[in-house]
Amino acid sequence: MPTDPTASARAYALAVDFGGTKVEAALVDTDGRLVEGSRHRRPTGRNATVPELEDSVGGVVRAAAASLPDGARIVGVGIGSAGPIDRARGLVSPLNVPHWRDYPMRDYVASVAAELGLDVPVVLEMDGVAITMAEHWVGAAQGVDNVMGMVISTGIGGGLIVGGRVITGPTGNAGHIGHVEVGATFGGKALRGEDTFGNPYALEAMASGPHTVAWARQHGFEGATGEELAAAYAAGDLVAREAIARTGEAVGRAIASATALLDLELVAIGGGFSHSTPDLFDHMRTVIEHHYFPFVRKVRIVPSALSSEGPLIGAAALIHRAHLLP
Amino acid sequence: MPTDPTASARAYALAVDFGGTKVEAALVDTDGRLVEGSRHRRPTGRNATVPELEDSVGGVVRAAAASLPDGARIVGVGIGSAGPIDRARGLVSPLNVPHWRDYPMRDYVASVAAELGLDVPVVLEMDGVAITMAEHWVGAAQGVDNVMGMVISTGIGGGLIVGGRVITGPTGNAGHIGHVEVGATFGGKALRGEDTFGNPYALEAMASGPHTVAWARQHGFEGATGEELAAAYAAGDLVAREAIARTGEAVGRAIASATALLDLELVAIGGGFSHSTPDLFDHMRTVIEHHYFPFVRKVRIVPSALSSEGPLIGAAALIHRAHLLP
């Protein structure tokens, strides 16, 4: 009997993306495409209790699994989670979800999968790792062996592919680019940010969406959100322009440090605040263009080529592209 | 006929360590031991011309090869060089050797080897990569899969082993920890250093031996060398103590950034200035102990376990431990 040529197209990963405000799940095929109608979302958040969080995670996993087309099968469950995580034990302690500290996310999802009759691997990695794998698979980093994926949003996170292999680190927390320090001045003043866990020099403390807005407000901006800052920028507001220039410089300097350390070829950046204006990327690139090392100057900084499905595609890559993991 | 059980012990790497003041070569066995009498040294330096540099490199290679014991053989030539380098093309552009820019070091050494009748691989990597491989092989990082090797001396360099594999980067320049920025204040003042290629926030600009001495001199220290600073420190001089504390904090903060990015387990530090006082390590460790992420706090910072033979052992590792390279 001949092998069914569509068999591999029918092997789906059940992808879970867990973040500080919501959890999503969907089925993703071996080409990185979501099954229509399989994407489901539930709230998480700072105030959610453990039973509420489990209800949300279990809810989206069950709903996604129920979307499985006839004749198809689920070959694994991939979870990208806000960090920090404990990769070996499958635990998560997302910064913005204080009720989960060393919570056994992998075991919980495995128990839901078992309840659904699924006897498949369940893989947990940090969300930054997942999204970097998505860029490498179907996004802006296809065919590039030395990549940092970044998300600039409420926080700043990331992930690494070095020498064609995903770097998770022994605990699963490699890629925390938001917690790399930046030492530059900007316009002659120290590029100090808001406190992030007591470190105003962490990139995230300077350059996340909320911290950029906070800096602008200290300098007279009257809006409250990243969207308002982007609108003010587009309208030519001088404080907004300075805020974007400062954040672009900070991100560029962190990328320069990461490239000095890892000899990166490409950085792909997504996340809500990264869409404020394309000029944000130009400010980053200016830092890189003026670096004294040619091997740093070679790094390209590009916008993510993923839609809002990116984190789910990345979670699916933990299954479909498992050969790139350690 | 039985295989000679001592055959592998008789396979030597010809190791070359090229730096800004000298070049050395020696024969190194498969256990990381130098062959007695095989170590040779010649000067290099800022003013050396290309023929003088070739004379020095060729001289030590020929002298080391001439030390080969009867019945033994050379199985490869490993070169650790001051960077930056171009790994694919085998070129070096050592910062402190201005006469060599994109100099074809690998081809030159291969030509000397050919002249000696050696038909063996010639491998070139950055010195920081080599020394990290030496720590991992016979030094302070044995059995550890996620390691940064560091040298604190005239400059600050390094190398990386991540997930048990050496990270060279596509151009060969991964590991430039001295060019990662540090953003901390020290005693309420910005931890700004001397300019290093125009970047006073690069770790090397703050914390190398000469830059630490320069900072101390700005604050009243009257000595001129790292040795004199170490002596003043031992004698309880307050400026020397502050200079060491400041440098330790800067190095600790760069290690924290590298660990946030790479989830490192161990950092092994050598180089002349690292021997100033064991307290230097305590200042680094204090930064790490107070970090907000447990996965950063786990990183151990230890002195190199290598003697002055370390860079040569590392260059030999490029041959004897080639399986760890990309």
Image: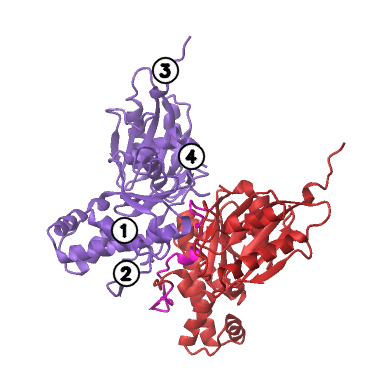
Chain colours: A red, B purple
Residue under the point 44% across and 26% down: B118
Find residue A236 and report its image quarter: bottom right
Q: Is residue A299 visible?
A: no
Above/below status of A111 relative to B246:
above
Residue B285: numbered disc: 1
Find residue A272 and report its image quarter: bottom right
| Image: magenta residue range | A168-196
Task: Quote the CA–CA distance across marks 2 and 3.
Answer: 57 Å
Q: Is residue A147 visible?
A: yes
Q: Position of residue B136 (x, y in %)?
A: 39, 41
Callout 4, which amino acid? Leu
Disc 3 designates what residue?
B5
Does the magenta stretch mainly form a helix, a strand or a loop?
loop
Q: Position of residue A304 (x, y in %)?
A: 63, 65
Q: Is residue B301 magenta?
A: no
Q: Earlier in the sequence, mark 2 or mark 3?
A: 3
Judging from the image, mark 2 belongs to the subunit labelled B
